[in-house]
Each structure stands twice: as C-alpha cells, then as structure tokens.
Image: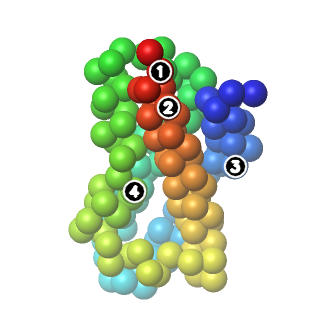
Amino acid sequence: MNQGERIEAMYRSSFSGGFPYKDCIWLANHLHLPSEELIPDLDLYFGDIAGYSSSASRLLSRSYAELQTAEKILAKDFFQRFPELEVVRHHIGSEHTPDLFLRMDIAEGLRLALLQLLRVGDSTP
C-alpha cells in the first residue's frame, strides 16, 4: 500500500461521519461566539482535507497548478487559516467537545500526511 492509499484508508476509517455540530454549538455558546462564525470555517477546512484525502492515491496526477493550490491550502492548520478563531483553540478538548477534538486530531494527521505526499511527489523527477 502506497502513501496515497494509506491516506485514503485513514480517511475512510476515521474521518467519515457527521459534522460535530453539537460540540461546535457548545463551544460557541461557552465562548459567546455566533456559531455561524465557527461552523462554516470548520466545514470548509474539513471539506478541503476530506476532498484531498479521499483521492490521495491520485493526487500527484493532478496538474502542477492544482498541486500548488493543494499545498497552499494544506500548509496551514485550522488556526493559521482562520486566525480570528484562535480563541477557541484551548477550549477544544476531550471533555466538553470530544467529537470536535477527535475530528480536529484526525484532520491534522491527514493534513500532515497529505503535505508529506505532496512534498515527496514534488521531489520525484
């Protein structure tokens, strides 16, 4: 199994399932944030990672421009991409937001694996 296939397997076994709305609403209420600030950004972030992960074995066959876009998107973790939501970082945990906590952890693993795949593919002649 190559790196792309491993990423796809990890995605299928760990990242599928429903969006952690309940945890996001708890977090927004706890921090007095409108949930419409948090949920769309998380949905976009998770969607980008899911899209690249679900087709990771074919990722390197994309055009150079598409690969550059993918690397640009994947280069930043959630809080680098959405710095205005940094305030929520330390409130995401296994006690109050277990589904979101797990999803963020899995997303980070997939993101880093995808970046590694892109960078290894970039060095292949």
- Residue furthest out toward the left: 84
Identify the image quadrant of residue 27: bottom left
Single out the mark in the foreground, 3 or 2.
2
Helix, strand or loop at label 1? It is loop
Q: Are marks 3 and 1 in contact (CB under 8 Å)?
A: no
Q: CA distance from mark 1 to mark 2?
A: 7 Å
Which numbered disc flags the more N-terminal residue, 3 or 2?
3
Q: Is residue 8 visible?
A: no
Residue 120 tag number: 2
Location of residue 73 by image quarter: top left
**Amino acid type at image mark 2:** Val
Q: Name the front one of labels 1 and 4.
A: 1
Residue at screen point 24% across, 68% down: 84
Q: In this orientation, which residue lies closer to the viewer: 60 or 88?
A: 60
Choose the circle earlier in sequence order: 3 or 1: 3
Please name the amino acid that badge 1 sits on: Thr
Image mark for residue 14? 3
Rendered-image quadrant of the C terminus: top left
**Residue 59 point in image, percent of width and height:** 50, 23
> Could you tell me how far apart the alpha carbons at marks 1 and 4 are, in whole angstroms?
25 Å
- In the image: residue 7, left or right of residue 30: right
Give the residue drawn at x 50%, y 75%.
Answer: 92
State the CA–CA distance, disc 3 to disc 2: 24 Å
